Image: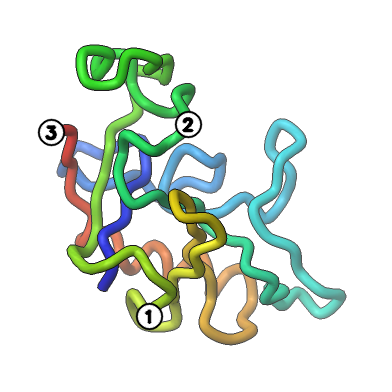
């Protein structure tokens, strides 16, 4: 499984919060502040166009506004909310590959990829598949 990073809010058990706002483990299927992460067709199935939950090969490669300010010593441009934490999952090369049941990584740029459904599913199923990975994400801000 590829090594992937994402900043997310955390729960008391130090795993990411399942959340559909763009700040947690999930995707924005409906617009949040004008942004969506995926599109669905008329029957409610996720359109397989490479979009999904955004990840990077290192937390230092994430947009500066997502890196928590407390990490400014390691990332001088860090401007993100202190409520966000850098989570990691996997340990392999950052390339297109399966990551969990029903999910795969689609790399669209060398320093960015999206976790997408492997096949057409409902938005609800995609959100559940993402939530099922919750225990595999660990905080890593080193």
**In-image side of 104 versus 87 (left or right):** right
Question: Which is nearer the eye, 52 or 123?
Answer: 52
Residue sitting at x 15%, y 43%? 13
Question: Which is nearer the eye, 39 or 67?
Answer: 67
Report helix, strand or loop for mark 1: strand
Q: Position of residue 115 (x, y in %)?
A: 47, 64
**In-image side of 102 versus 122 (left or right):** left
Quadrant assignment, res 49: bottom right
Give the class, few, some or many, for how many residues have Cα within 10 Å of label 3's Cα (few <14, many ≥20).
few
Give the class, few, some or many, for how many residues have Cα within 10 Å of label 1's Cα (few <14, many ≥20).
some
Which residue matches tag 2? 63
Which residue matches tag 3? 142
Indicate which disc, 1 or 3, sits on the residue closer to the N terminus. Answer: 1
Report helix, strand or loop for mark 2: loop
Question: Which is nearer the eye, 95 or 38?
Answer: 95
Give the class, few, some or many, for how many residues have Cα within 10 Å of label 2's Cα (few <14, many ≥20).
some
**In-image side of 109 versus 103 (left or right):** right
């Amino acid at each position: 499984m590829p090594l992937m990073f994402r900043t997310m809010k955390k729960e008391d058990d130090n795993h990411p919060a399942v959340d559909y706002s763009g700040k947690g483990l999930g995707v924005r299927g409906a617009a949040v502040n004008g942004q969506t992460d995926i599109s669905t067709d008329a029957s409610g199935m996720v359109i397989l166009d490479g979009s999904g939950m955004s990840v990077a090969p290192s937390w230092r490669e994430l947009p500066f506004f997502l890196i928590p300010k407390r990490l400014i010593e390691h990332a001088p441009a860090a401007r993100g909310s202190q409520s966000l934490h850098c989570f990691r999952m996997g340990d392999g090369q950052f390339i297109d590959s399966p990551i969990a049941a029903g999910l795969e990584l689609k790399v669209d740029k060398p320093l960015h990829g999206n976790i997408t459904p492997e096949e057409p599913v409902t938005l609800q199923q995609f959100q559940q598949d993402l939530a099922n990975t919750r225990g595999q994400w660990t905080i890593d801000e080193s």
